Amino acid sequence: MASSPDVIVIGAGVLGLCTAAELAGRGHAVTVVDPGGPNASSVAAGMLAPALESLLEDLTPEQAGFLKRARDLWPAFAKAHGLTLHREGAEWRGPDAAAAIERLRELGFEARATRTGLLTPDDWRIDPGAALTVLSRTPGLSTVRARVARLAGDARRWRVEAEDGRTWFAPSIVLATGAAPATPGLPPMVAGLVESIQPIRGQLTQVMVEGPGRVVRAPGVYVAPVAGGVVVGATMEPGRRDLDPDPEEARIKVAAGLALLGVEGEAGATRVGVRGAVADGLPLAGASGPPGLFLALAPRRNGWLLGPLVAAIVADGIEGHPAIADAAALDPLRFG
């Protein structure tokens, strides 16, 4: 069996589905090939958090501005694709709130003191599970459940072969395979890029408790609203790909999260995901060198925040439009 869409996207995480939805919205016939099941984007809190990420990572004003511009793409993207954007802000309950407020303001964010710390309106969120479902149903986008076994390409088109024998052809493909190893058949230079991505294991736990209705953060822990309670997370364990939950780590995080809220609650399921990252912590997004081969990979822990930006950069590249200013920061060839 063979089919020939305009673009094939390999991977149905946030970067893959945002890119596929952006392309479909521009009129392209898009096929997303994915093995199904949970992925790192579904095991996430859905934070769109340029302010507190900038604070936690001690970013420069220029880096903070980049994250803020990425977040600013979300309202139009959410409206175009029928996504619900939660803009209630986020709380910081870490030490020295006064210094944190001053630092956030220096970085160009709003922040005000609260009884327990600070509140910034600049951090938003989205529900990951619902958003992935809605994006996968974008008109013009079809999803097939398959595990890609091999790629082959020339100057005219790419061939995508599944393990079960199905085959697809397209002039452009987007590799959005997260932290997975390089797919057989990739050109050596691109395979090397993919293999340079460091896996980072993270886990979060759902807790049945009434939360404050917004994200609450402190050093090493966050609490985010979900249906039926909150999720508490998350670990960052570089170099690990295993997906078995660590009960002791979950217990420690849940205790810290409940202490942050000042409440008691009952822990539910713990979920594990593996993200990818490269040296500067930013994604690989755009043309990879070989004609028709584009990357949407390695967003570290900001995949949801950067989804619409990555989608725009990759879609512009496929359509041959001039690159937007922020594309250079995510150029897959920037380390060469």
Image: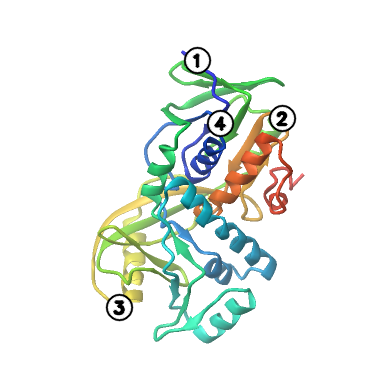
- For the residue pair 327 and 176, the one nearer the viewer reads as 327
Mark linked to residue 28: 4
Residue marked by disc 3:
262
Q: Mark 4 to mark 2: distance in Å?
A: 21 Å
Mark linked to residue 290: 2
Quadrant location of the C terminus in the rendered image: top right
Mark linked to residue 2: 1
Secondary structure, mark 2, is: loop
- For the residue pair 6 and 67, the one nearer the viewer reads as 6
Q: Mark 2 to mark 3: distance in Å?
A: 54 Å
Is 40 left or right of 254, judged from the image as shown? right
Ranked by sequence position, the earlier of labels 1 and 3 is: 1
Ranked by sequence position, the earlier of labels 1 and 2 is: 1
Q: Position of residue 155 (x, y in %)?
A: 72, 21
Secondary structure, mark 3, is: loop
Q: Mark 4 to mark 3: distance in Å?
A: 50 Å
Secondary structure, mark 1, is: strand
Is 130 left or right of 304, judged from the image as shown? left
The amino acid on which the numbered mark 1 sits, given as a three-letter code, is Ala
Q: Mark 1 to mark 2: distance in Å?
A: 23 Å
The nearer-to-camera label among 4 and 3 is: 4
Ranked by sequence position, the earlier of labels 4 and 2 is: 4
